[in-house]
Image (tube, rainbow, N blue to C red):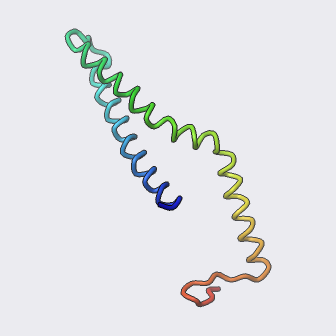
């Protein structure tokens, strides 16, 4: 599996987990402002699931946060590289034909 495929798999899994995380918060919000009463065990279960889901996503979140500036610089540097070669006369090639 190449890097692009790994990132696609990561994105798909992260989006799935994020949806679960939001769903759990929505479920917990059903108890907000109400007396919990006999639902204490259910509320605690939801809170635990929220924490576990977040911790499952945390390595990916931390990876992105720790490298945010690096990623921004990489994109800026690449865009500058493309602009520089275009200014030097390069043209985009698609299907073995130059595109102006």
Q: Is residue 68 left or right of residue 44?
A: right
Q: Position of residue 32 (x, y in %)?
A: 32, 19
The part of the image, by quadrant, that contains residue 26 is: top left
Count how many numbered circles sit on residues in the image. 0
The part of the image, by quadrant, that contains residue 47 is: top left
View extreme (right): residue:
88
View extreme (bottom): residue:
97
Query: For the point 78% across and 77% down, which residue is it?
Result: 87
Q: Is residue 47 left or right of residue 72?
A: left
Query: For the point 71% across and 58% down, which residue is it?
Result: 76
Q: Is residue 98 left or right of residue 84?
A: left
Q: Position of residue 58 (x, y in %)?
A: 49, 35
Q: Position of residue 56 (x, y in %)?
A: 43, 35
View extreme (left): residue:
38
Query: For the point 73% across and 71% down, which residue is it?
Result: 83
Q: Is residue 57 left or right of residue 65?
A: left
Query: Vertical placement of 35 versus 32: above or below?
Result: above
Query: Vertical placement of 71 versus 83: above or below?
Result: above
Query: Vertical placement of 89 versus 16: above or below?
Result: below
**Quarter occupied by the C terminus:** bottom right
Q: Position of residue 73 (x, y in %)?
A: 71, 53
Query: Vertical placement of 55 versus 3: above or below?
Result: above
């Amino acid at each position: 599996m190449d890097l692009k495929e790994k990132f696609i798999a990561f994105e798909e899994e992260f989006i799935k987990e994020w949806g679960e995380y939001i769903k759990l918060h929505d479920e917990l919000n059903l108890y907000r402002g109400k007396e919990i009463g006999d639902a204490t065990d259910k509320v605690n279960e939801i809170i635990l699931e929220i924490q576990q889901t977040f911790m499952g996503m945390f390595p990916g979140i931390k990876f992105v946060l720790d490298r945010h500036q690096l990623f921004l610089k990489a994109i800026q540097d690449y865009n500058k590289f493309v602009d520089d070669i275009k200014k030097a006369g390069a043209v985009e090639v698609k299907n073995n034909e130059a595109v102006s």
